[in-house]
Image (tube, rainbow, N blue to C red):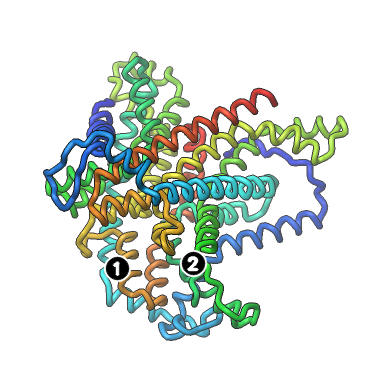
Protein backbone atom coordinates (compact mmCIF):
# COMPACT_ATOMS: atom_id res chain seq x y z
CA UNK A 1 0.00 0.00 0.00
CA UNK A 2 2.79 2.41 0.87
CA UNK A 3 4.17 2.87 -2.59
CA UNK A 4 4.73 6.21 -4.21
CA UNK A 5 1.55 8.14 -4.79
CA UNK A 6 0.70 8.13 -8.48
CA UNK A 7 -0.67 11.39 -9.65
CA UNK A 8 -3.66 11.20 -11.87
CA UNK A 9 -3.61 14.19 -14.15
CA UNK A 10 -6.40 16.24 -12.64
CA UNK A 11 -6.19 19.98 -12.53
CA UNK A 12 -5.73 20.84 -8.91
CA UNK A 13 -7.99 23.85 -8.50
CA UNK A 14 -10.23 24.45 -5.53
CA UNK A 15 -13.49 23.55 -7.26
CA UNK A 16 -12.54 20.02 -8.30
CA UNK A 17 -11.21 19.35 -4.80
CA UNK A 18 -14.51 20.43 -3.26
CA UNK A 19 -16.45 18.37 -5.79
CA UNK A 20 -14.35 15.29 -5.05
CA UNK A 21 -14.91 15.59 -1.30
CA UNK A 22 -18.61 16.14 -1.89
CA UNK A 23 -18.92 13.02 -4.04
CA UNK A 24 -16.95 10.97 -1.52
CA UNK A 25 -19.11 12.28 1.30
CA UNK A 26 -22.37 11.43 -0.47
CA UNK A 27 -21.08 7.99 -1.44
CA UNK A 28 -20.03 7.29 2.15
CA UNK A 29 -23.44 8.37 3.46
CA UNK A 30 -25.21 6.05 1.01
CA UNK A 31 -22.90 3.13 1.79
CA UNK A 32 -23.31 3.56 5.51
CA UNK A 33 -27.04 4.28 5.48
CA UNK A 34 -28.00 0.79 6.74
CA UNK A 35 -25.48 1.06 9.59
CA UNK A 36 -26.55 4.58 10.56
CA UNK A 37 -30.19 3.52 10.58
CA UNK A 38 -29.33 0.63 12.85
CA UNK A 39 -27.51 2.76 15.39
CA UNK A 40 -30.05 5.61 15.24
CA UNK A 41 -33.00 3.30 15.79
CA UNK A 42 -31.33 1.34 18.59
CA UNK A 43 -30.90 4.58 20.54
CA UNK A 44 -34.62 5.41 20.54
CA UNK A 45 -36.87 4.25 23.35
CA UNK A 46 -38.41 0.87 22.69
CA UNK A 47 -41.78 2.45 21.95
CA UNK A 48 -40.39 5.15 19.70
CA UNK A 49 -38.33 2.64 17.71
CA UNK A 50 -41.56 0.83 16.81
CA UNK A 51 -43.62 3.77 15.64
CA UNK A 52 -41.27 6.60 14.76
CA UNK A 53 -41.15 7.99 11.25
CA UNK A 54 -38.09 10.11 11.93
CA UNK A 55 -34.49 9.12 11.39
CA UNK A 56 -32.92 10.49 14.57
CA UNK A 57 -34.14 9.63 18.08
CA UNK A 58 -36.10 12.35 19.89
CA UNK A 59 -34.09 11.65 22.99
CA UNK A 60 -31.21 9.22 23.27
CA UNK A 61 -32.19 6.21 25.36
CA UNK A 62 -30.50 2.92 26.20
CA UNK A 63 -33.77 1.15 26.99
CA UNK A 64 -33.35 -1.26 24.06
CA UNK A 65 -29.89 -2.23 25.20
CA UNK A 66 -31.16 -3.01 28.69
CA UNK A 67 -33.99 -5.13 27.25
CA UNK A 68 -31.60 -7.19 25.14
CA UNK A 69 -29.23 -7.88 27.99
CA UNK A 70 -31.96 -8.82 30.47
CA UNK A 71 -34.21 -10.84 28.16
CA UNK A 72 -31.90 -12.92 25.99
CA UNK A 73 -28.79 -15.07 25.90
CA UNK A 74 -27.04 -12.21 24.20
CA UNK A 75 -24.10 -11.80 26.58
CA UNK A 76 -23.55 -15.55 26.63
CA UNK A 77 -23.50 -15.59 22.83
CA UNK A 78 -20.95 -12.77 22.78
CA UNK A 79 -18.82 -14.75 25.24
CA UNK A 80 -19.00 -17.90 23.09
CA UNK A 81 -17.97 -15.94 20.03
CA UNK A 82 -15.06 -14.38 21.89
CA UNK A 83 -13.78 -17.79 23.03
CA UNK A 84 -14.13 -19.35 19.58
CA UNK A 85 -12.56 -16.33 17.86
CA UNK A 86 -9.54 -16.21 20.19
CA UNK A 87 -8.89 -19.95 19.96
CA UNK A 88 -9.25 -19.91 16.18
CA UNK A 89 -6.86 -16.97 15.97
CA UNK A 90 -4.20 -18.74 18.03
CA UNK A 91 -4.58 -22.03 16.15
CA UNK A 92 -4.53 -20.33 12.76
CA UNK A 93 -1.39 -18.31 13.52
CA UNK A 94 0.46 -21.34 14.91
CA UNK A 95 -0.44 -23.78 12.16
CA UNK A 96 -0.24 -21.42 9.21
CA UNK A 97 3.13 -19.97 10.18
CA UNK A 98 4.68 -23.45 10.40
CA UNK A 99 3.19 -24.56 7.10
CA UNK A 100 3.86 -21.22 5.40
CA UNK A 101 7.49 -21.39 6.46
CA UNK A 102 7.89 -24.88 5.05
CA UNK A 103 6.27 -23.86 1.75
CA UNK A 104 8.45 -20.79 1.57
CA UNK A 105 11.78 -22.51 2.31
CA UNK A 106 11.58 -26.09 1.05
CA UNK A 107 11.10 -27.09 -2.55
CA UNK A 108 9.97 -30.40 -3.93
CA UNK A 109 7.14 -32.40 -5.40
CA UNK A 110 5.30 -32.81 -2.10
CA UNK A 111 5.31 -29.07 -1.42
CA UNK A 112 4.06 -28.14 -4.85
CA UNK A 113 1.21 -30.66 -4.59
CA UNK A 114 0.36 -29.32 -1.15
CA UNK A 115 0.22 -25.75 -2.38
CA UNK A 116 -2.00 -26.71 -5.31
CA UNK A 117 -4.38 -28.45 -2.92
CA UNK A 118 -4.48 -25.31 -0.79
CA UNK A 119 -5.40 -23.17 -3.79
CA UNK A 120 -8.11 -25.60 -4.82
CA UNK A 121 -9.59 -25.60 -1.32
CA UNK A 122 -9.76 -21.85 -1.61
CA UNK A 123 -12.51 -22.11 -4.25
CA UNK A 124 -14.35 -25.17 -2.92
CA UNK A 125 -17.90 -24.71 -1.67
CA UNK A 126 -17.91 -24.75 2.15
CA UNK A 127 -20.96 -27.00 1.96
CA UNK A 128 -19.06 -29.79 0.23
CA UNK A 129 -16.86 -30.29 3.29
CA UNK A 130 -19.47 -29.24 5.80
CA UNK A 131 -21.96 -32.03 5.07
CA UNK A 132 -19.46 -34.84 5.70
CA UNK A 133 -17.93 -32.98 8.64
CA UNK A 134 -21.40 -32.77 10.15
CA UNK A 135 -21.94 -36.51 9.84
CA UNK A 136 -18.49 -37.14 11.33
CA UNK A 137 -19.17 -34.78 14.24
CA UNK A 138 -22.49 -36.52 14.87
CA UNK A 139 -20.73 -39.87 15.04
CA UNK A 140 -18.03 -38.53 17.36
CA UNK A 141 -20.68 -36.76 19.49
CA UNK A 142 -18.95 -33.45 18.89
CA UNK A 143 -22.05 -31.55 17.76
CA UNK A 144 -22.61 -28.52 19.98
CA UNK A 145 -18.96 -28.27 20.97
CA UNK A 146 -16.62 -25.38 20.33
CA UNK A 147 -13.97 -27.88 19.25
CA UNK A 148 -16.08 -28.99 16.29
CA UNK A 149 -16.80 -25.42 15.30
CA UNK A 150 -13.14 -24.37 15.47
CA UNK A 151 -12.13 -27.46 13.53
CA UNK A 152 -14.55 -26.62 10.74
CA UNK A 153 -13.43 -22.97 10.74
CA UNK A 154 -9.84 -24.10 10.28
CA UNK A 155 -10.84 -25.65 6.95
CA UNK A 156 -11.56 -22.14 5.71
CA UNK A 157 -8.98 -20.06 7.58
CA UNK A 158 -5.93 -22.28 7.00
CA UNK A 159 -5.67 -22.34 3.19
CA UNK A 160 -5.97 -18.57 2.98
CA UNK A 161 -3.64 -17.90 5.92
CA UNK A 162 -0.91 -20.26 4.75
CA UNK A 163 -0.81 -18.52 1.38
CA UNK A 164 -0.73 -15.12 2.91
CA UNK A 165 1.96 -15.87 5.49
CA UNK A 166 4.08 -17.65 2.87
CA UNK A 167 4.17 -14.36 0.97
CA UNK A 168 5.55 -12.60 4.03
CA UNK A 169 8.19 -15.28 4.66
CA UNK A 170 9.25 -15.15 1.00
CA UNK A 171 10.31 -11.55 1.47
CA UNK A 172 12.62 -12.35 4.40
CA UNK A 173 16.09 -13.02 2.91
CA UNK A 174 17.37 -16.56 3.27
CA UNK A 175 20.85 -15.21 4.23
CA UNK A 176 19.62 -14.20 7.67
CA UNK A 177 18.79 -17.78 8.60
CA UNK A 178 21.97 -19.06 7.01
CA UNK A 179 24.00 -16.73 9.18
CA UNK A 180 22.14 -17.91 12.29
CA UNK A 181 22.61 -21.54 11.38
CA UNK A 182 26.35 -21.03 10.88
CA UNK A 183 26.35 -19.71 14.43
CA UNK A 184 24.89 -23.04 15.48
CA UNK A 185 21.18 -22.18 15.79
CA UNK A 186 18.85 -24.92 14.57
CA UNK A 187 16.50 -24.24 11.67
CA UNK A 188 13.51 -24.23 14.00
CA UNK A 189 15.39 -21.90 16.33
CA UNK A 190 16.14 -19.46 13.55
CA UNK A 191 12.51 -19.64 12.43
CA UNK A 192 11.30 -18.70 15.91
CA UNK A 193 13.94 -16.09 16.66
CA UNK A 194 14.49 -14.48 13.27
CA UNK A 195 11.68 -15.13 10.82
CA UNK A 196 8.72 -14.78 13.15
CA UNK A 197 9.77 -11.42 14.67
CA UNK A 198 10.43 -10.05 11.18
CA UNK A 199 6.98 -11.14 10.02
CA UNK A 200 4.83 -9.73 12.80
CA UNK A 201 2.73 -7.65 10.37
CA UNK A 202 1.90 -10.84 8.47
CA UNK A 203 1.07 -12.72 11.65
CA UNK A 204 -1.13 -9.84 12.77
CA UNK A 205 -2.99 -9.78 9.46
CA UNK A 206 -3.56 -13.55 9.55
CA UNK A 207 -4.72 -13.39 13.15
CA UNK A 208 -7.12 -10.53 12.56
CA UNK A 209 -8.61 -12.33 9.59
CA UNK A 210 -9.17 -15.46 11.64
CA UNK A 211 -10.79 -13.43 14.41
CA UNK A 212 -13.11 -11.56 12.06
CA UNK A 213 -13.99 -14.77 10.24
CA UNK A 214 -15.02 -16.45 13.49
CA UNK A 215 -17.03 -13.40 14.48
CA UNK A 216 -18.85 -13.18 11.14
CA UNK A 217 -19.45 -16.79 10.28
CA UNK A 218 -23.04 -17.99 10.20
CA UNK A 219 -23.51 -21.09 8.05
CA UNK A 220 -21.15 -23.54 9.72
CA UNK A 221 -22.13 -22.33 13.20
CA UNK A 222 -25.84 -22.65 12.45
CA UNK A 223 -25.35 -26.33 11.70
CA UNK A 224 -22.86 -27.32 14.37
CA UNK A 225 -24.34 -25.37 17.28
CA UNK A 226 -27.84 -26.47 18.23
CA UNK A 227 -28.39 -25.44 21.86
CA UNK A 228 -29.26 -21.79 22.43
CA UNK A 229 -26.76 -21.28 25.24
CA UNK A 230 -23.83 -22.53 23.16
CA UNK A 231 -24.51 -20.37 20.12
CA UNK A 232 -22.10 -17.79 18.77
CA UNK A 233 -23.19 -14.25 18.13
CA UNK A 234 -24.16 -14.62 14.46
CA UNK A 235 -26.43 -17.58 15.11
CA UNK A 236 -27.64 -16.08 18.37
CA UNK A 237 -28.66 -12.89 16.57
CA UNK A 238 -30.40 -14.89 13.89
CA UNK A 239 -32.42 -16.80 16.51
CA UNK A 240 -33.10 -13.51 18.23
CA UNK A 241 -34.56 -12.14 15.00
CA UNK A 242 -36.94 -15.10 14.77
CA UNK A 243 -38.02 -14.76 18.41
CA UNK A 244 -38.46 -11.01 18.66
CA UNK A 245 -39.45 -10.47 15.09
CA UNK A 246 -41.43 -7.34 15.70
CA UNK A 247 -39.28 -5.81 18.42
CA UNK A 248 -36.91 -3.99 16.07
CA UNK A 249 -35.59 -1.72 18.80
CA UNK A 250 -34.11 -4.66 20.74
CA UNK A 251 -32.90 -6.41 17.61
CA UNK A 252 -31.02 -3.37 16.38
CA UNK A 253 -29.52 -2.75 19.81
CA UNK A 254 -28.26 -6.34 19.84
CA UNK A 255 -26.86 -5.94 16.32
CA UNK A 256 -25.12 -2.71 17.30
CA UNK A 257 -23.46 -4.31 20.32
CA UNK A 258 -22.35 -7.27 18.22
CA UNK A 259 -20.64 -4.85 15.81
CA UNK A 260 -18.42 -3.30 18.48
CA UNK A 261 -15.43 -5.69 18.16
CA UNK A 262 -15.45 -5.20 14.39
CA UNK A 263 -15.52 -1.44 14.86
CA UNK A 264 -12.54 -1.66 17.23
CA UNK A 265 -10.57 -3.60 14.63
CA UNK A 266 -11.42 -0.98 12.02
CA UNK A 267 -10.14 1.78 14.27
CA UNK A 268 -6.98 0.14 15.61
CA UNK A 269 -5.95 -2.43 13.02
CA UNK A 270 -7.19 -1.04 9.73
CA UNK A 271 -3.75 -1.33 8.18
CA UNK A 272 -3.66 -5.10 8.68
CA UNK A 273 -7.16 -5.60 7.33
CA UNK A 274 -6.23 -3.81 4.11
CA UNK A 275 -3.01 -5.80 3.95
CA UNK A 276 -4.83 -9.09 4.23
CA UNK A 277 -7.39 -8.02 1.68
CA UNK A 278 -4.86 -7.07 -0.97
CA UNK A 279 -2.70 -10.12 -0.23
CA UNK A 280 -5.73 -12.30 -0.81
CA UNK A 281 -6.11 -10.83 -4.28
CA UNK A 282 -2.48 -11.23 -5.24
CA UNK A 283 -2.32 -14.82 -4.12
CA UNK A 284 -5.71 -15.77 -5.51
CA UNK B 1 7.22 -28.47 10.56
CA UNK B 2 4.62 -28.66 7.91
CA UNK B 3 3.15 -31.89 9.26
CA UNK B 4 0.58 -30.46 11.73
CA UNK B 5 -1.01 -28.35 9.01
CA UNK B 6 -0.87 -31.10 6.43
CA UNK B 7 -2.50 -33.44 8.89
CA UNK B 8 -5.25 -30.97 9.75
CA UNK B 9 -5.90 -30.07 6.15
CA UNK B 10 -6.02 -33.72 5.13
CA UNK B 11 -8.29 -34.56 8.03
CA UNK B 12 -10.57 -31.54 7.92
CA UNK B 13 -10.64 -30.57 4.26
CA UNK B 14 -9.35 -33.13 1.83
CA UNK B 15 -10.96 -36.13 3.46
CA UNK B 16 -14.36 -34.43 3.93
CA UNK B 17 -14.32 -33.09 0.38
CA UNK B 18 -13.64 -36.57 -0.99
CA UNK B 19 -16.15 -38.12 1.39
CA UNK B 20 -18.65 -35.40 0.44
CA UNK B 21 -18.21 -36.12 -3.24
CA UNK B 22 -18.80 -39.79 -2.44
CA UNK B 23 -22.01 -38.96 -0.53
CA UNK B 24 -23.25 -37.34 -3.72
CA UNK B 25 -23.47 -40.81 -5.22
CA UNK B 26 -25.41 -42.33 -2.34
CA UNK B 27 -28.88 -42.23 -0.94
CA UNK B 28 -28.17 -40.82 2.48
CA UNK B 29 -30.74 -39.29 4.80
CA UNK B 30 -30.11 -37.73 8.19
CA UNK B 31 -33.40 -39.12 9.47
CA UNK B 32 -32.15 -42.67 8.95
CA UNK B 33 -28.42 -42.50 9.59
CA UNK B 34 -26.32 -45.51 8.85
CA UNK B 35 -28.65 -46.56 6.08
CA UNK B 36 -26.67 -45.00 3.27
CA UNK B 37 -26.78 -46.86 0.03
CA UNK B 38 -24.63 -46.43 -3.07
CA UNK B 39 -26.85 -45.39 -5.95
CA UNK B 40 -24.33 -44.31 -8.57
CA UNK B 41 -25.32 -41.36 -10.72
CA UNK B 42 -28.94 -41.40 -9.60
CA UNK B 43 -28.78 -38.14 -7.61
CA UNK B 44 -26.96 -36.32 -10.39
CA UNK B 45 -29.29 -37.50 -13.15
CA UNK B 46 -32.37 -36.70 -11.08
CA UNK B 47 -30.98 -33.24 -10.44
CA UNK B 48 -30.12 -32.57 -14.06
CA UNK B 49 -33.12 -34.14 -15.78
CA UNK B 50 -35.96 -34.29 -13.32
CA UNK B 51 -35.77 -31.24 -11.08
CA UNK B 52 -37.22 -28.08 -12.65
CA UNK B 53 -36.41 -26.15 -9.45
CA UNK B 54 -32.71 -26.77 -10.00
CA UNK B 55 -32.59 -24.89 -13.31
CA UNK B 56 -34.51 -21.97 -11.88
CA UNK B 57 -32.04 -21.67 -8.99
CA UNK B 58 -29.06 -22.20 -11.26
CA UNK B 59 -30.36 -19.41 -13.49
CA UNK B 60 -30.75 -17.00 -10.61
CA UNK B 61 -27.37 -17.93 -9.13
CA UNK B 62 -25.89 -17.04 -12.50
CA UNK B 63 -27.75 -13.72 -12.85
CA UNK B 64 -26.95 -12.82 -9.27
CA UNK B 65 -23.25 -13.62 -9.61
CA UNK B 66 -22.79 -11.76 -12.91
CA UNK B 67 -24.68 -8.68 -11.69
CA UNK B 68 -22.86 -8.51 -8.36
CA UNK B 69 -19.43 -9.05 -9.93
CA UNK B 70 -19.99 -6.47 -12.65
CA UNK B 71 -21.69 -3.96 -10.38
CA UNK B 72 -19.10 -4.14 -7.64
CA UNK B 73 -16.28 -3.96 -10.19
CA UNK B 74 -17.63 -0.80 -11.83
CA UNK B 75 -18.38 0.82 -8.50
CA UNK B 76 -15.00 -0.26 -7.13
CA UNK B 77 -13.14 1.07 -10.18
CA UNK B 78 -14.97 4.39 -10.06
CA UNK B 79 -14.33 4.89 -6.37
CA UNK B 80 -10.69 3.83 -6.65
CA UNK B 81 -10.11 6.42 -9.41
CA UNK B 82 -11.81 9.03 -7.26
CA UNK B 83 -9.74 8.17 -4.19
CA UNK B 84 -6.40 7.96 -6.01
CA UNK B 85 -5.18 11.42 -5.01
CA UNK B 86 -3.92 13.16 -1.94
CA UNK B 87 -6.89 13.33 0.38
CA UNK B 88 -7.49 14.39 3.92
CA UNK B 89 -9.28 11.90 6.22
CA UNK B 90 -7.78 8.98 4.26
CA UNK B 91 -8.06 6.62 7.24
CA UNK B 92 -11.62 7.62 7.92
CA UNK B 93 -12.66 7.12 4.30
CA UNK B 94 -10.99 3.72 4.21
CA UNK B 95 -12.72 2.67 7.42
CA UNK B 96 -16.08 3.69 5.95
CA UNK B 97 -15.40 1.66 2.80
CA UNK B 98 -14.28 -1.37 4.79
CA UNK B 99 -17.40 -1.57 6.95
CA UNK B 100 -19.56 -3.54 4.49
CA UNK B 101 -16.66 -5.95 3.96
CA UNK B 102 -16.06 -6.79 7.62
CA UNK B 103 -19.54 -6.54 9.09
CA UNK B 104 -21.08 -9.92 9.95
CA UNK B 105 -23.65 -10.83 7.28
CA UNK B 106 -26.31 -11.51 9.87
CA UNK B 107 -25.97 -7.92 11.11
CA UNK B 108 -25.98 -6.60 7.55
CA UNK B 109 -29.12 -8.65 6.93
CA UNK B 110 -30.86 -7.14 9.98
CA UNK B 111 -29.86 -3.63 8.91
CA UNK B 112 -31.09 -4.04 5.35
CA UNK B 113 -34.33 -5.64 6.47
CA UNK B 114 -35.03 -2.81 8.87
CA UNK B 115 -34.29 -0.30 6.13
CA UNK B 116 -36.19 -1.99 3.31
CA UNK B 117 -39.13 -4.00 4.65
CA UNK B 118 -42.62 -2.76 3.93
CA UNK B 119 -42.89 -0.85 7.22
CA UNK B 120 -39.13 -0.33 7.39
CA UNK B 121 -37.32 2.94 7.89
CA UNK B 122 -36.95 3.87 4.23
CA UNK B 123 -40.66 3.42 3.51
CA UNK B 124 -41.54 5.33 6.69
CA UNK B 125 -39.30 8.23 5.73
CA UNK B 126 -40.49 8.34 2.12
CA UNK B 127 -44.16 8.15 3.18
CA UNK B 128 -43.83 10.83 5.82
CA UNK B 129 -42.12 13.04 3.24
CA UNK B 130 -45.09 12.27 0.95
CA UNK B 131 -42.82 11.03 -1.81
CA UNK B 132 -44.74 7.77 -2.09
CA UNK B 133 -48.29 6.82 -1.14
CA UNK B 134 -47.92 3.07 -0.79
CA UNK B 135 -44.89 1.36 0.76
CA UNK B 136 -42.46 -0.05 -1.81
CA UNK B 137 -42.19 -3.84 -1.43
CA UNK B 138 -38.41 -4.12 -1.74
CA UNK B 139 -38.48 -7.60 -0.27
CA UNK B 140 -41.99 -8.63 -1.28
CA UNK B 141 -42.13 -9.09 -5.04
CA UNK B 142 -39.99 -11.28 -7.29
CA UNK B 143 -38.37 -8.45 -9.25
CA UNK B 144 -37.82 -6.10 -6.35
CA UNK B 145 -36.40 -8.77 -4.04
CA UNK B 146 -34.02 -9.95 -6.75
CA UNK B 147 -32.83 -6.40 -7.31
CA UNK B 148 -32.52 -5.90 -3.57
CA UNK B 149 -30.27 -8.91 -3.00
CA UNK B 150 -28.14 -7.88 -5.97
CA UNK B 151 -27.73 -4.37 -4.54
CA UNK B 152 -26.84 -5.72 -1.09
CA UNK B 153 -24.43 -8.17 -2.75
CA UNK B 154 -22.70 -5.28 -4.53
CA UNK B 155 -22.66 -3.42 -1.24
CA UNK B 156 -20.73 -6.17 0.50
CA UNK B 157 -18.26 -6.79 -2.34
CA UNK B 158 -17.30 -3.35 -3.66
CA UNK B 159 -14.92 -2.59 -0.73
CA UNK B 160 -12.65 -5.42 -1.81
CA UNK B 161 -12.67 -4.18 -5.41
CA UNK B 162 -12.08 -0.56 -4.44
CA UNK B 163 -9.14 -1.17 -2.14
CA UNK B 164 -7.35 -3.68 -4.36
CA UNK B 165 -7.74 -1.50 -7.47
CA UNK B 166 -6.67 1.54 -5.47
CA UNK B 167 -3.55 -0.28 -4.31
CA UNK B 168 -2.58 -1.14 -7.85
CA UNK B 169 -3.37 2.38 -9.11
CA UNK B 170 -0.95 3.68 -6.52
CA UNK B 171 1.68 1.36 -7.92
CA UNK B 172 1.56 3.06 -11.34
CA UNK B 173 4.50 5.49 -11.47
CA UNK B 174 3.42 9.09 -11.89
CA UNK B 175 6.12 9.70 -14.52
CA UNK B 176 4.14 7.76 -17.13
CA UNK B 177 1.30 10.25 -16.88
CA UNK B 178 3.64 13.17 -16.90
CA UNK B 179 5.41 12.09 -20.06
CA UNK B 180 2.06 11.35 -21.70
CA UNK B 181 0.96 14.84 -20.78
CA UNK B 182 4.09 16.32 -22.33
CA UNK B 183 3.28 14.37 -25.49
CA UNK B 184 -0.08 16.11 -25.50
CA UNK B 185 -2.35 13.32 -24.20
CA UNK B 186 -5.63 14.44 -22.72
CA UNK B 187 -6.84 13.05 -19.38
CA UNK B 188 -9.35 10.75 -21.09
CA UNK B 189 -6.63 9.47 -23.41
CA UNK B 190 -4.19 8.66 -20.65
CA UNK B 191 -7.00 6.89 -18.81
CA UNK B 192 -7.85 4.83 -21.89
CA UNK B 193 -4.30 4.03 -22.96
CA UNK B 194 -2.37 3.96 -19.68
CA UNK B 195 -4.61 3.32 -16.69
CA UNK B 196 -6.95 0.70 -18.13
CA UNK B 197 -4.30 -1.53 -19.73
CA UNK B 198 -2.19 -1.45 -16.57
CA UNK B 199 -5.21 -2.45 -14.50
CA UNK B 200 -6.15 -5.36 -16.73
CA UNK B 201 -4.31 -8.09 -14.88
CA UNK B 202 -5.54 -7.11 -11.42
CA UNK B 203 -9.06 -6.66 -12.84
CA UNK B 204 -9.13 -10.25 -14.09
CA UNK B 205 -7.93 -11.44 -10.68
CA UNK B 206 -10.40 -9.50 -8.55
CA UNK B 207 -13.38 -10.18 -10.78
CA UNK B 208 -12.60 -13.92 -10.79
CA UNK B 209 -12.35 -13.91 -7.02
CA UNK B 210 -15.57 -12.01 -6.46
CA UNK B 211 -17.25 -14.21 -9.04
CA UNK B 212 -16.21 -17.33 -7.10
CA UNK B 213 -17.18 -15.91 -3.71
CA UNK B 214 -20.54 -14.68 -4.94
CA UNK B 215 -21.37 -17.90 -6.75
CA UNK B 216 -20.77 -19.87 -3.56
CA UNK B 217 -22.12 -17.27 -1.16
CA UNK B 218 -24.80 -18.35 1.24
CA UNK B 219 -25.11 -15.76 3.99
CA UNK B 220 -25.80 -12.57 2.03
CA UNK B 221 -29.10 -13.75 0.66
CA UNK B 222 -30.09 -16.20 3.36
CA UNK B 223 -29.90 -13.66 6.17
CA UNK B 224 -32.05 -11.21 4.21
CA UNK B 225 -34.72 -13.22 2.38
CA UNK B 226 -33.90 -16.91 3.08
CA UNK B 227 -34.33 -17.39 -0.67
CA UNK B 228 -37.87 -16.02 -0.69
CA UNK B 229 -40.37 -14.71 -1.62
CA UNK B 230 -41.59 -17.95 -3.24
CA UNK B 231 -37.96 -19.07 -3.79
CA UNK B 232 -37.35 -16.19 -6.19
CA UNK B 233 -33.98 -15.34 -4.64
CA UNK B 234 -32.92 -18.95 -4.10
CA UNK B 235 -29.35 -19.81 -5.09
CA UNK B 236 -27.66 -23.19 -5.32
CA UNK B 237 -25.93 -22.71 -1.96
CA UNK B 238 -29.21 -22.06 -0.15
CA UNK B 239 -30.86 -24.89 -2.07
CA UNK B 240 -28.21 -27.40 -0.94
CA UNK B 241 -28.29 -26.07 2.65
CA UNK B 242 -32.05 -26.49 2.83
CA UNK B 243 -31.93 -29.90 1.20
CA UNK B 244 -29.28 -31.10 3.64
CA UNK B 245 -30.32 -29.58 6.91
CA UNK B 246 -34.04 -28.90 6.64
CA UNK B 247 -35.04 -31.95 4.62
CA UNK B 248 -32.17 -34.12 5.86
CA UNK B 249 -31.44 -35.39 2.37
CA UNK B 250 -27.66 -35.07 2.43
CA UNK B 251 -27.03 -37.35 -0.52
CA UNK B 252 -29.01 -35.10 -2.83
CA UNK B 253 -27.55 -31.97 -1.20
CA UNK B 254 -24.02 -33.20 -1.85
CA UNK B 255 -24.97 -33.79 -5.48
CA UNK B 256 -26.06 -30.14 -5.66
CA UNK B 257 -22.73 -28.92 -4.29
CA UNK B 258 -20.81 -31.16 -6.67
CA UNK B 259 -22.70 -29.70 -9.63
CA UNK B 260 -22.20 -26.24 -8.13
CA UNK B 261 -18.45 -26.81 -8.02
CA UNK B 262 -18.27 -28.29 -11.52
CA UNK B 263 -20.30 -25.46 -13.06
CA UNK B 264 -18.22 -22.86 -11.22
CA UNK B 265 -14.97 -24.40 -12.41
CA UNK B 266 -16.19 -24.36 -16.01
CA UNK B 267 -17.38 -20.74 -15.75
CA UNK B 268 -14.11 -19.56 -14.21
CA UNK B 269 -12.05 -21.35 -16.85
CA UNK B 270 -14.12 -19.82 -19.65
CA UNK B 271 -13.83 -16.38 -18.10
CA UNK B 272 -10.07 -16.67 -17.60
CA UNK B 273 -9.62 -17.81 -21.18
CA UNK B 274 -11.71 -14.99 -22.63
CA UNK B 275 -10.04 -12.39 -20.40
CA UNK B 276 -6.62 -13.87 -21.12
CA UNK B 277 -7.14 -13.70 -24.88
CA UNK B 278 -8.14 -10.08 -24.69
CA UNK B 279 -4.97 -9.47 -22.74
CA UNK B 280 -2.86 -10.86 -25.57
CA UNK B 281 -4.57 -8.98 -28.39
CA UNK B 282 -4.61 -5.64 -26.60
Q: Residue furthest front?
A: B50
Query: Is B225 drawn above or below residue B85 in the view shown?
Result: below
Query: Is B20 drawn above or below residue B148 in the view shown?
Result: above
Disc 2/disc 1 C-alpha distance (Å): 27 Å
Tag 2 secondary structure: loop
> What numbered label is drawn on residue A169?
none
Position of B101 with respect to B22 (left or right) is: right
Query: Is A27 drawn above or below residue B54 in the view shown?
Result: below
* Quarter of the image where one finds residue B95: bottom right
Look at 73% across and 55% down and name the residue there.
A20
Position of A167 with respect to B158 (left or right) is: left
Residue A260 visible in the current orientation: no
Query: Is A47 drawn above or below residue B234 in the view shown?
Result: below
* Label 2 neighbour load within 10 Å: few <14, some 14-19, many 20+: many
Disc 1: which residue = A74
Disc 2: which residue = B139
* Residue A88 image point, x, y percent: 29, 46
Chain for disc number 1: A
* Residue B244 image point, x, y percent: 27, 50
User: Does the CB distance between marks 2 and 1 fall below 8 Å?
Assistant: no
Nearest to the eye among marks 2 and 1: give it: 2
Look at 49% across and 52% down and name the residue there.
B101
Amino acid sequence: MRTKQARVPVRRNGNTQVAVYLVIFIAAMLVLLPIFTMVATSLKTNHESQISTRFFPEKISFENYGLVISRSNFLMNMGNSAVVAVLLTVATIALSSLAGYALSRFKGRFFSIFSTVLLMLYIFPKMLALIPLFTIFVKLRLIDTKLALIASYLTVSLPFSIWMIKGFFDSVPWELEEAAMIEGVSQFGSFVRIILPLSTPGLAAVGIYAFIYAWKEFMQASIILRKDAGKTISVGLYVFVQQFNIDWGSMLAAATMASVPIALFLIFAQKYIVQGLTAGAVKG
Amino acid sequence: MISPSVLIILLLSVYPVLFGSYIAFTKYNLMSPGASEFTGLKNITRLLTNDPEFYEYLGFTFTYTISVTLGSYLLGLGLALLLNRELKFRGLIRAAILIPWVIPPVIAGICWKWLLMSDGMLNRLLMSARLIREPVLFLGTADFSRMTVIVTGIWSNFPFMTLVILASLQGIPGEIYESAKIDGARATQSFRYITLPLLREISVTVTSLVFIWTYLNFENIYTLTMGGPANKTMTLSIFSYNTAFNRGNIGYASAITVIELVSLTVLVQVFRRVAGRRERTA
